[in-house]
Every structure is written in C-alpha cells, then in structure tokens.
Amino acid sequence: MFQKKYFRLFWLLLVLGFLSYPLFSSLTRVEEPKISPVLRYYMCFRTAQPLTIDGRLDEESWKKVYWSEDFLDIEGKGKPKPRFRTRVKMLWDDQYFYVGAELEEPHVWATLKDRDSIIYLDNDFEVFIDPDGDTHNYYELEINALNTVWDLMLVKPYRDGGPAIHSWDIQGLKTAVYVDGTLNNPNDKDKGWSVEIAIPWEVLKEAAAFKKKPEPGDQWRINFSRVEYRTVVENGVYVKAKDQRTGQVLAEDNWTWAPQGVINIHYPEMWGYVQFTATEAGKAKEYCDEDPDADVKWALRRIYYRQRNFLAEKGRFALNLEELNLAKDKDLKVKGWNYPPTIMTTESLFEAVYTNQSGVKWHIRQDGLVWKTETNEK
C-alpha cells in the first residue's frame, strides 16, 4: 500500500514535470534589436472597382494611391542602402486586401515552381500581417518571380516557440507577377518585376480582433520583406554567387519596409501599421493616426527581451528593473504611465504591467504576448 501510494505520486509529479517542461525549455535567449521601432504608417484607401490581378499595377485605383517609403536594410539605416529599389502600395474593398509591389531588378530569375516551397531560397517578396497587433497569430506570404506562393500562419514567433503552420492556406488568394524584361535570361538586362496580391478578408479575419474584417479607422500591424541574392552566370543560367574562400553561397540581402534592427523578420513589434479608411482612392488626402501606445508597448518589450535573457543566464526571471539593468534607463519612463511597471514572476512565468491614471493597463508576458485591459479605476 505504501509503495503504491508513492508510485502514483511519483508518476503524477513526472507527468506534471513533462507538461511544464516545454514551456520553460522553449524560452531561450532572444536578440535585442539594435534600434527602436521605426514607425511606418500607410493609409489604405478603398478601390471603387475590384482589381484585375495581373501584376501590372496600371489600373486607375493604383495610380491614385501613394507609394510607401523605399525599403531599407532589415537592420536599419546604419547598414548599406539596398542595391535595388523596392516599394509597395495598398488598397481594399469589401472582399479583399490588395498589395502591390515594385521590385527593381536587372536580372530577374526564379526556380521554385511548387506551392509551399521554401520561397526565400529564391529572390522573393514577402508579406506579414498581424491583424490585432499582439505579436501572436500572424500571417506570412512569400512569392517569387514565377508567381509561386508559400503561405503559412505563425501561432507565435519562432523565438517564442512557434509553431509555423505550413499546411495553412489562404483560400481564395489571388496573385500575379509581371516581369519587365525576360525571366531567367542572362543575355539581357531587365528593369524588374511587380507583384499584385488580393487576400480575402474571409481568411484574414481569423486572427483579427472580434474575428472581423477592419472598419474605417482600424489599424493592423504589417510589414514587407524582400530577399535578394547575388548571382553569377554559369553555363548560361543564373546561379547564386559563392564566397571564393569558403565555397559557400553568399548570404542573402534582406530589405524591409519597416526595419527590424536585427536580421529576423519575425519581430512583429518592429513592423509598420496600415490604417483603413472609407475614403475612395483619389477623393481626398488623409493621414494615419500615430499609435498613442507605441512608447509604452516598446518599454514593455524591452523588459521582455531582458527577462528572456536573464532566464537563460540565471535560470529564473528577474524580480525588478534593477536585476535587468533597466532601472536607470530613461526610455522606460513613459509620460502618462505609472513608473515603475509592476513585475510579477513565478519559476517559469513572468508578467510586466504598465498602468495609467485612467486605469488602462498594458501587459506583456514570457512568450511575448502583449495585450491591453481597462478598469474603472481613477
């Protein structure tokens, strides 16, 4: 009887240990961006007529909306300016979110033809959308110059354990590519290629607040990336250039609309914003609202980076800003928000909270999820 009692207890503890192990063990060190977020905003106007998705971006609705800023190196302005220009436009209607991209490229090439291939092994254009801005449950879409698509959904960023759902497809997706030149022909010089994408709201709303498409005035987090390899011509075809010393393929360039401050696009807190308006393209000029909570969310994110790295080093989460070497950091004192933030920890969990005088609270936890709550406190 004694042995059976403790045998059951042993197995209970063992099971509980296994259940908690993945959460704790998946929280490894994370790299801190070398820059603060560059707050990119784009006002997304409505198109009066559904667009014909042919890759050309020559319809009147496209002509009436502005181009985004040119892409920068993924790490920011401190790195060399991209060799080729990349920029985007956005539109919407009741059925679709439209993205148009223009990629300058003197030698357009692509090899991958099967859907859901690892498209960034070719030169590509990529779209990332986080509808509710909490950095979890977001979409990724990649496309090459052959119009081959890879679409997937991330439950969490890879640093927070993922996973990436590769079997997820955007039902009803429309894409097209137009090559201004000749594809895979090294005997001439091309001008580039353009991409046109229509993503149904019926799919995008899955991860949106209240599971609905945006209303005028709503903002979603979004970013765009371009992967670009250096190439040479061998036996009449393009191949990736190699390091002459090591024989390894040269690392690709990564260019993005909103820079990340780190060579990793899966930092959704660094992405830009798209704001939706009911105004038809070309009818009036409108400007985006700046995120009033950008500073407090960034302050919480910095605590998250330090907590994750403190855990990796010490085997526990820090109890306060002093342990995180953030107590003297002036950027953590956000106007209108009570300082210092509240930090709560257990052996394998933490939550940090900023509160303002109206009772609004912003939270962040160990896997990077960020969210807002409100109370009636004054």
Image (tube, rainbow, N blue to C red):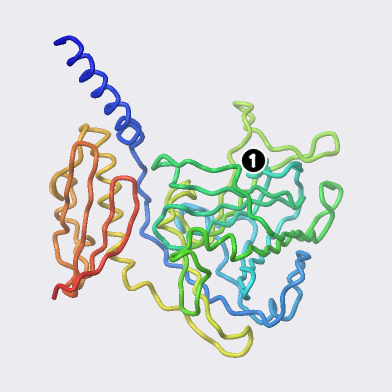
Residue at screen point 61% across, 71% down: 90
Q: Nearer the viewer, residue 211 or 282?
A: 211
- Residue 353, image x, y percentages: 21, 58
Q: Could you tell me which quadrant the N terminus lies in? A: top left
Instruction: Judge from the rendering whether residue 226 lies leftward or rightward of residue 222; answer left or right.
Output: right
Residue at screen point 63% across, 61% down: 86
| Residue found at the far front of this picture | 1
- Residue 228, image x, y percentages: 64, 48
What is the total number of numbered labels drawn onto the structure image?
A: 1
Q: Is residue 377 above or below residue 114?
A: below
* Local SS, label 1: loop
Instruction: Judge from the rendering whether residue 29 lies leftward or rightward of residue 101; answer left or right.
Output: left
Q: Residues within 10 Å of mark 1 (few under 14, many from 20)?
A: some
Q: Is residue 2 above or below residue 200?
A: above
- Residue 24, image x, y percentages: 30, 34
Q: Nearer the viewer, residue 278 or 194?
A: 278
Residue at screen point 46% across, 59% down: 77
Q: Is residue 267 above or below residue 111?
A: below
Q: Is residue 131 above or below residue 276?
A: above
Residue at screen point 67% across, 65% down: 198
Q: Could you tell me which quadrant the C terminus lies in? A: bottom left
Instruction: Judge from the rendering whether residue 52 lies leftward or rightward of residue 297; answer left or right.
Output: right
Instruction: Judge from the rendering whether residue 356 lies leftward or rightward of residue 22; answer left or right.
Output: left
| Quarter of the image where one finds residue 96 | bottom right
- Residue 17, image x, y percentages: 27, 26
Residue that numbered label 1 is attached to: 118
